[in-house]
Amino acid sequence: MEKPLYVLIMAGGEGTRFYPVSTPERPKQFLSFFGGRTFIQQTYDRILPIAHPARIIVATNSRYTKLVRSQLPAILSSNIIPEPFKKNTAPSIAYAARMIIEAEEDAVMLVLPSDHLIEKEEEFRKVIERAIYVASEREVLVTLGIRPTWPADCYGYLRLGKMIEDDVEGRHAYIVDAFVEKPSVAVAEGYLKDGNYLWNSGMFVWQAHFILSEIKNHLPSLYALADKYVPKKRIKKFFEEAESISIDYGVMERSDRVVTLPCDIGWHDVGTWEGLYNIAQKGNFKLDPRVEEAMRAQLRL
């Protein structure tokens, strides 16, 4: 039987790297850099063909709750997690996973950053559906690995291990042998030639109960806080007491149950003005004139 899919959109960043376009009052995820829909709206639109709006959750800084409601009016108020403190990604994921299993114990959970660009949206959804299948059939943590197209020194990498699930359409699943920190350009060039390294996208699929089990194994105090406070909806106490730690460092790098699906989805993590310039140069996205003016000023073009 198909398991219900829940989606967690991570939207708590303050977007400081794109000042003055992005500000702490209205950060990048709530802006449109290319005209039309904002980053968070595009993330929502992208997943809507395979996810029910009532099962989409947004974790954000409490100061951005009104922005979420105005930009994503179909999101249930009870599905917005207003974080009163910045505590990185692991607490947000733990809180949401505990929420989800209270609603449906057998749910599968998809975690998405709110501010990525994806050109090949149909292929993205096919990869997600394949990841859902792998996560449903096995007790594993699935991370989407992006096939590198250039020797990036701004992303973390995954090293591929053995294949554990083949697929007639080529969407194979592999054990992750290692997580690698952001390398130098020279090292990244070696990764590109090697062919067994992928960019770490920060997009994850897992069974909600299994990520909680892995959090219990590797971050037991965080698990205990979720168990104590989520049923009572005591968000402030939970985030006040939670350790600030990323899901990558806290769980993914420590677990021996991590799997990746290598994919080519036209993925861009727009993290710097230089990165934005490179995307604009390819011609697939036309920058909003105000954003282009700010970019040129920042890069002295």
Image: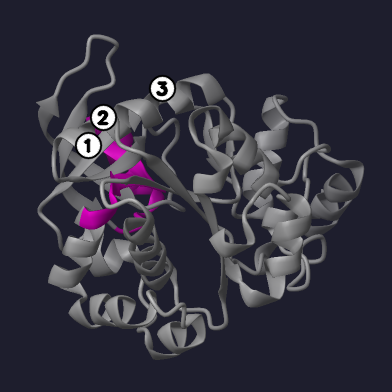
In the image, what residue occupies the spot 53% across and 37% down? Answer: 52
In the image, what residue occupies the spot 34% across and 67% down? Answer: 94
CA distance for labels 2 and 1: 5 Å
Q: Which residues are magenta?
A: 181-209
Q: Secondary structure at mark 2?
A: helix
In the image, what residue occupies the spot 61% across and 73% down? Answer: 61
Q: Amino acid at mark 1?
A: Ser
Q: Which residue is mark 1?
A: 136
Left or right placement of residue 285 versus residue 102 in this view: right
Q: Which residue is mark 3?
A: 126
Q: Amino acid at mark 3?
A: Lys
Compared with 241, 161 (above or below) is above
Left or right placement of residue 222 versus residue 71 in this view: left
Q: Earlier in the sequence, mark 3 or mark 1?
A: 3
From where the camera sits, is residue 35 visible? yes
Nearest-to-viewer mark from 3 and 1: 1
Label 2–label 1 contact, CB within 8 A = yes
Nearest to the observer: residue 125 or residue 29: 125
Image coordinates of residue 122 in percent, x first then y, are 52, 20
Residue 203: in magenta span? yes
Nearest to the observer: residue 233 or residue 156: 233
Nearest to the observer: residue 9 or residue 156: 9
Left or right placement of residue 54 versus residue 301 in this view: left
In the drawing, what numbered circle is on residue 133?
2
